[in-house]
Image (spheres, rainbow, N blue to C red):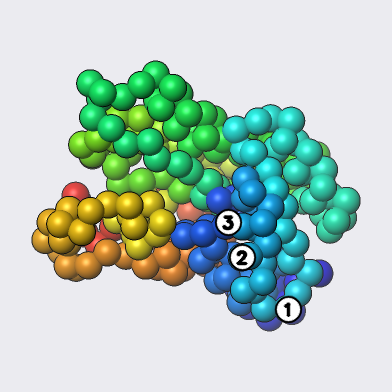
Amino acid sequence: MASAVGLLAGRLALVTGAGSGIGKAVCQVFAKEGATVAVVDLHADTANSTLETLPKGDHQAFGADVSCSASVNDLIGQLKDKFSAVPTVTVNSAGITRDKLMLKMSEEDFDEVIRVNLKGTYLVNQAVGRALVESKAKSGSIINISSISGKVGNVGQTNYAASKAGVVGLTKTVAKEMGRFGIRVNAILPGFIETPMTDKVPDHLIQMTKMLIPLSRLGKPEEIANACLFLASDHSSYVTGTTLEVAGGLFP
């Protein structure tokens, strides 16, 4: 199924939010390290675009709405049918922003961000966790993408910061529950990363942000992907329930 060489050789990896940004980079790094990748995005066409950038293999693109339990459960069924296996590595990268100051934020904007970023992460953790336990897999690694905003907050991101803080709490709790099955669950807190999300930020704000970052630059999606690789591989075999900040030193 997967390459015989690499840190993730022989493993099936599920990556959500894989159509662009961090999710796309994770797919590329994992595929290079020998994993077979299930490339998942809300829109199948963007998932297929990422699929075309991967080295040859049995990788497959899927469209799924992580905020809908029926869609997530159907996805797991499709993976079993396609690969005759369940993912032993999962990266929950699907996420959205609807930025506004709290006093101007609509209830709909708040609910939508919580639904995708937090509920979506919960549903995928639950579905993958169940599949791993039912298959009697001896190990597994689930990596949830949170945000440095979930730790320190950020102006205009009441909904986003709340959702990402929730991801941290979810991660720590699921890690406690799944450890007895050999399933590790960790979270990564990216800082400001060059993605389609940050492309929407005015340049003067980007320049101000760089001044606050000790490394004086935005991060690259590949740098988050490499952190995911560590947590997905056996190099982190005794790491669970933790958060890894990849933010260039911003907000220590």
Asked whether residue 38 appears in the rendered view, the answer is no
Q: Are marks 2 and 3 in contact (CB under 8 Å)?
A: yes
Please report whichever mark, 2 or 3, sits nearer to the chain's N-terminal start: 3
What number is the disc on residue 114? none
Q: Secondary structure at mark 2?
A: helix
Q: What kind of element bears circle 1? A: loop
Q: CA distance from mark 2 to mark 3?
A: 7 Å
- The residue depicted at 47 percent of the width and 59 percent of the height is 22
Q: Residue at x 62, y 73 (%)?
A: 53
Residue shown at 75% from the left, 43% from the top: 75
Circle 2 residue: 50
Q: Is residue 66 above or below residue 233?
A: above
Residue 125 relative to residue 200: left or right: right
* Type of amino acid under label 1: Lys
Mark 1 or mark 2: name the one nearer the start of the chain.
Answer: 2
For the residues labelled 1 and 2, the Cα–Cα distance comes to: 13 Å
Residue 18: mark in rendering: 3
Q: Nearer the viewer, residue 17 or 26?
A: 17
Percent position of residue 40, x then y: 65, 52
Residue 56: mark in rendering: 1
